[in-house]
Image: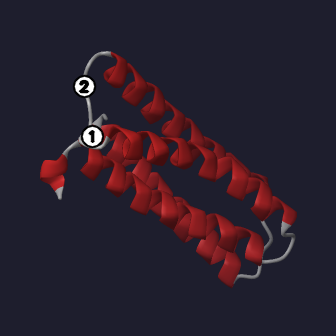
């Protein structure tokens, strides 16, 4: 994993969560800008996934390979699934779904880093 990319993903996830929480408290439904934000976050996650796959093929191995791959696959699936769910929820709770997903992504990225490099625990 690339440490600086993981840090960018965590910061973007926190920023997106904060933005969506503000939208929720202002009773605003999800809009196109929320989708664009989730799309950018998803592209960052895809980049980290590709880099991780290249490193795995190159011979680097995390401590728990199966767990790492499962987390990585889940992290990539969360943004599009939650964006669709948030878009279908046309009330103020649509952005709340996205905020929750961003907090989950943050926790999963921390865990992915810990699996990749156990000395971070």
Q: Which residue occupies 66% across, 84% down? A: 25
- Pick whichever, 65 or 2, lies toward us: 65
Say whether residue 3 is left or right of residue 90.
left
Nearest-to-viewer mark from 1 and 2: 2
Q: Which residue is mark 1?
A: 3
Q: Position of residue 105 (x, y in %)?
A: 49, 57
Q: Earlier in the sequence, mark 1 or mark 2?
A: 1
Q: Position of residue 15 (x, y in %)?
A: 49, 61
Q: CA distance from mark 1 to mark 2?
A: 15 Å
Q: Say few, some or many: other residues with alpha carbon within 10 Å of mark 2 (under 14 / 14 to 19 / 20 or more).
A: few
Residue 26 in view of the camera:
yes
Q: Secondary structure at mark 2?
A: loop
- Pick whichever, 36 or 96, lies toward us: 96
Q: Which residue occupies 28% across, 48% down? A: 115
Say whether residue 57 is left or right of residue 75.
left
Quarter of the image where the N terminus is located: top left
Residue 37 in view of the camera:
no
- Pick whichever, 92 or 59, lies toward us: 59
Say whether residue 80 is left or right of residue 104.
right
Q: Say few, some or many: other residues with alpha carbon within 10 Å of mark 1 (under 14 / 14 to 19 / 20 or more).
A: few
Query: How was the colour assigned to the protein in this rendering?
Result: secondary structure
Q: In the image, which disc is placed on residue 69?
A: none
Q: Which residue occupies 78% across, 78% down? A: 92
Q: Which residue is mark 2?
A: 60
Considering only vertical position in the picture, is 61 above or below 116? above
Say whether residue 40 is left or right of residue 2.
right
Q: Secondary structure at mark 1?
A: helix
Q: Position of residue 97 (x, y in %)?
A: 68, 69
**Residue 16, located in which quarter of the rendered image?**
bottom right
**Residue 87, located in which quarter of the rendered image?**
bottom right
Quarter of the image where the C terminus is located: bottom left
């Amino acid at each position: 994993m690339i440490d600086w990319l993981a840090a960018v993903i965590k910061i973007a996830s926190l920023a997106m969560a904060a933005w969506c929480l503000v939208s929720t408290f202002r009773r605003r439904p999800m809009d196109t800008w929320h989708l664009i934000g989730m799309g950018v976050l998803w592209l960052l996650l895809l980049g980290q996934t590709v880099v991780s796959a290249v490193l795995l093929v190159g011979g680097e191995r995390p401590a728990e390979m199966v767990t790492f791959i499962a987390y990585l696959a889940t992290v990539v699936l969360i943004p599009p699934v939650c964006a669709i769910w948030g878009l279908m929820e046309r009330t103020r709770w649509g952005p709340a779904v996205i905020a929750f997903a961003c907090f989950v992504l943050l926790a999963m990225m921390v865990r992915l880093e810990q699996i990749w490099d156990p000395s971070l625990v």
